[in-house]
Image (spheres, rainbow, N blue to C red):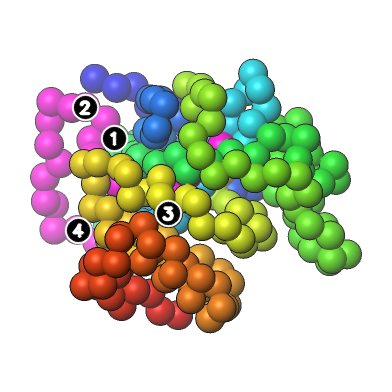
Amino acid sequence: MRLPLPQFAPRDRPAHHWAEVIETATTEYLAQCLEPETLSFPTMPPFGSWVRSRDEDSGNQIYGIVYHATTAPIDSVHRAQALGLSLDDLREQQPQIFSMLKTEFRVAIVGFVPLAAFNPDAIGPEGVNVAAIASIQQVGANLIQGTIYQHLPPRPPQIHQAVYGCDREEVVEFTAKMDFLRTLLQMTGIPTDALIAATLREVYQLRQGDRAWLVQAGRTLSVLLKDDYDRLRAILSQVHL
């Protein structure tokens, strides 16, 4: 039986702090969502969305993409049962339900950025300070000023490291190059094509319909897929605003 994660008081939780690493490996990790401040279920991160954690020893900010998410009872012996109640009814009649379920998601690691590569104004005690990103954008400065590595880091994030939802600017700067697509194609045991399509769709929307970027992504995929045009067409047909 897996116990609930200890929760931080709302004032202690940084912005976009969604979850915490509970299982880690070289190529991926499992994270559990933190309980929301209100009486409701944790928000399940979208398939293909971008998240960031870190290797505390090196300071590397580790980027990944959500490829699987589940909500299930904390008690692995008993299954949830249909109650026929709305969320409002659950809050009124069965409020304990919300503390008896956990939401977890798996993340494919696609690259990392050394902490020193970030704009100094964006660095805080927990690594990247999301609250400072807006002010950096207002003055037209880049968030990431050094090298972005689109390959597996030397180490994955450690157990109990925070997991943050990525800011739009982070994703835009990270995806200026397309090497992360090769990493996704090499993963096994996941719906690879659907994940690539969801990832491209997420980035295309964050880039506000940047057609030139999408054409570049399509050309990169064409090379990686060795001119398998049917597969390429199936992937790109799922990319839209």
- Asked whether residue 230 is drawn in magenta, I would say no
**Residue 182, placed above or below residue 140:** above
Residue visible at 72% across and 35% down? 115
Which residue matches tag 4?
85
Which residue matches tag 1?
100
Quarter residue 170 falls in: bottom right
Magenta stretch bounds: 62-87
Count the marks: how many? 4
Q: Which mark is residue 75?
A: 2
How far is disc 2 from disc 3 in space, using C-alphas?
37 Å
User: Which of the two labelled residues, at mark 1 and mark 2, occupies the earlier sequence position?
Assistant: 2
| Residue closest to the eye, 18 or 105 | 105
Q: Under tag 2, what secondary structure? A: loop
Q: Under tag 3, what secondary structure? A: helix
Residues at circles 4 and 2 in contact by the CB criterion of under 8 Å: no
In screen coordinates, is 5 left or right of 14? left
In screen coordinates, is 194 left or right of 115? left
Residues at circles 1 and 2 in contact by the CB criterion of under 8 Å: yes
From the top left corner, tell me how far across and down residue 52 is, in percent. Answer: 55, 42
Residue visible at 41% across and 26% down? 26
**Residue 150, placed above or below residue 86:** above
User: Which of the two labelled residues, at mark 4 and mark 2, occupies the earlier sequence position?
Assistant: 2
User: Tag 4: residue type?
Assistant: Leu
User: Tag 2: residue type?
Assistant: Asp
> Which label lies toward us, 2 or 3?
3
User: Tag 1: residue type?
Assistant: Met
Quarter residue 171 falls in: bottom right
From the top left corner, tell me how far across and down residue 133 is, in percent. Answer: 75, 54
Disc 3 crowd rating (10 Å Cα; few below 14, some 14-19, many 20+) is some
**Can you say which quadrant of the picture contains the N terminus?**
top left
Disc 4 crowd rating (10 Å Cα; few below 14, some 14-19, many 20+) is few
| Residue closest to the eye, 221 or 207 | 221
